[in-house]
Image (spheres, coloured by chain):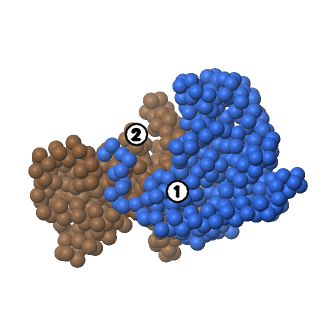
Amino acid sequence: MDNDKILDIYTRMLRIRRFEEQVGILFAQGQLPGFVHLYIGEEAIAAGVCAALRDDDYIVSTHRGHGHVIAKGGDFNRMMAELFGKATGYCKGKGGSMHIADFSIGMLGACGIVGGGIPLAVGAGLSAAYRGTDQVAVSFFGDGASNEGSFHESLNLAAVMKLPVIFVCENNRYGEFTPMEKVTAVRDIAVRATGYGIPGVIVDGTDALAVYDAAAAAVARARNGEGPTLIEAKTHRRGGHAEGEKAFLAGGVYRSQEELAEAQLKDPLLIMHRRMVAMHLIAPDVLEELDHRITQAVAEAVAFARRSPDPEPEAIYEDTWI
Amino acid sequence: MAKKTYVAAIKDALAEEMRRDSSVFLIGEDVRLGVFAGTRGLHAEFGDRRVIDTPISELAVAGAGVGAAITGLRPVVDLMFGTFLYLALDQIVQQAASARYMFGGQTRVPIVYMVQNGGGISAGAHHSQAVHPIFMNVPLLKVVMPSNPYDAKGLLKAAIRDDNPVIFLSPLSLTGVRGEVPDEEYVLPLGKGEIKRPGRDVTICSAGATVPAALKASQTLAVEGIEAEVIDLRTLKPWDEALVLESVAKTGRFVAVDESKPICGAASEWTATVAEKAFAYLKAPPQRVSGKDVASPFSPVLERAVIPSADDVVMAAKRTLLGAQEPIAQSHEARDSNQALVHGS
Ligand SMILES: Cc1ncc(C[n+]2csc(CCOP(=O)(O)OP(=O)(O)O)c2C)c(N)n1
Ligand SMILES: [Mg+2]
């Protein structure tokens, strides 16, 4: 892999991390309406996968979707404004955190319904095949989502039609507050691929370069007309299921200290940073400068969102046939 | 009497019924920890066998509930948000609601599906829908939508004891609301509404999330010398037609308020019944106040504009007092443009 690619992947990850950290702070301050689910700890997956895509490829996201938008090249200002519910947001304040989309970069939408986006990626793949392009479609979803019927129906449909789809399971070992082993009959989601006659690949989801390699192989396969791949990226959710959950759980505990500590250790950003410095790929001060610029851009996005107007109440009838 | 939150009242009802009847059990996603706290703590008392955390598989869980119900158990299925019922719709409509009738009375389906319904907290389009009319339209389901902790407890207990499938809807915007809940055992009958405030001038019919708006509107109207009678239906199916018709016979004016959408919404059903059965008593055209006919927007400003407000109810009540029917030509225009239809009602 060339150095530019590595730096590209790292930049995407850092953009996600700094954005999400700020969102966490804003939510704690009560500045954001609704719910937010942060992607912190899982950055290597969105970054590694999206770095293997072309701009005209598609992705479909989840309730934990900020990272996917950013990795595909999303705009901080319009994202942040959407999280504030402002008229300048990606969805003019109509969508919010769980419904961010940017069709101009092939980001076909976050999704509040677990497993709800998976069939859309199959349809985007079908559309690419139908139109005779060599675009591919990626469906991101969680370990929990792989217990929904939509997952199973989608894998079979994509497999039997040999569609250019990459199913990326972000296995962070939890669905809300329930550990995977209590609700999922297999330890590896990837083995489910066998039931649909497609490759199932397990990758360390905290290693961005490994994710990139797995994604690049699956993308090549899909572009070649060889059909879908299921990639299971094993990762950790560093924070809660949703921001503000502590207050709401009122002392309820569902994760051990050891497991949380392990999640902190396996920080994909640190892993990548250490590796780049060790390989003398890039000087630490250049990385610091990059971090500074990104942090600055996030701060500007917050300012942009704050000074943006709320939508007018009349806007409820815009974007309809009414 | 203790003041309790809506969710605490739900928890009490579940605990009491589970103690009373060992065939009652709770099943759903994260019911052990309790996403809305209504099931929190029950696991400590009842254990793994009766408080079952499930995979995120709404269709299978809803249908497994039916299978358990037709073989002697009384499941309470917690599906969290009303919109998640869509994933389970096939099993609820085709199996739960149909089995008793379709199999010629060989079986009963004593099951409760419990969810949070409606919007009001910027949860976004996928989590903020008032789904009840969909289920009102399913034959042989019962649909309950209490507006306060006292009713929630008494009606949930009745729902669990009922031999028919019941959709039990807690308004999302009212989960934290507190109210008096007696310590003594009580059960409220399904299908009975309540007059929350008596009045002679206009009947305002509501349920669930819109009851507070209806009551607030009645206070505003009272300041202007208009005495509104506010009804909380509590159960949407079967619903307390008699209570509503008697009230309209007294007031001669009718306003139906509901968060669901105007076309085939709950308010439409109530209004149609009043027009059909109490026409002779009406002094003015009945009015509907419904949610605006668009998806639920995220922005608090937009969401407020979509959900019926107390002001909307006041305006509708005043329209009945003016007694003037809109010219028919204008109504046609309104229907054609559709926008006016949803704006105007
Ligand atoms: C159909 C549906 N069921 C339940 C939920 C509630 N819910 C939101 S996120 C979530 C957990 C999802 O787990 P997973 O797919 O592993 O994604 P993660 O949150 O871990 O990224 C659940 C149960 C939902 N949004 N949609
Ligand atoms: Mg998960």
The kind of residue on which mark 2 rests is Val
Within-10-Å neighbours for mark 2: few <14, some 14–19, many 20+: some
The picture's colour for chain A is blue
Circles 2 and 1: CB atoms closer than 8 Å: no
At mark 1, the secondary structure is: helix
Residue B162 visible to the viewer = no
**Residue A222 horizontal/vertical position (percent):** 68, 28
| Chain of the residue on which disc 2 is drawn | B
The kind of residue on which mark 1 rests is Arg
**Residue A76 sits in which quadrant?**
bottom right
Q: Residue at x 82, y 59 (%)?
A: A283
Q: Is mark 1 within 8 Å of ligand 1?
A: no
Which residue bears the numbered disc 2? Answer: B138
Is A29 located above or below residue A168 in the figure?
below
Q: Residue at x 48, y 44 (%)?
A: B165
Which residue bears the numbered disc 1? Answer: A78
Residue A89 visible to the viewer = yes
In the image, B17 versus A94, the foreground residue is A94
Q: Residue at x 24, y 49 (%)?
A: B341
**How many numbered marks appear?**
2
Which chain is assigned brown?
B
Q: Residue at x 37, y 67 (%)?
A: B212
**Residue B99 horizontal/vertical position (percent):** 48, 33
Label 2 – label 1 distance at C-alpha = 42 Å
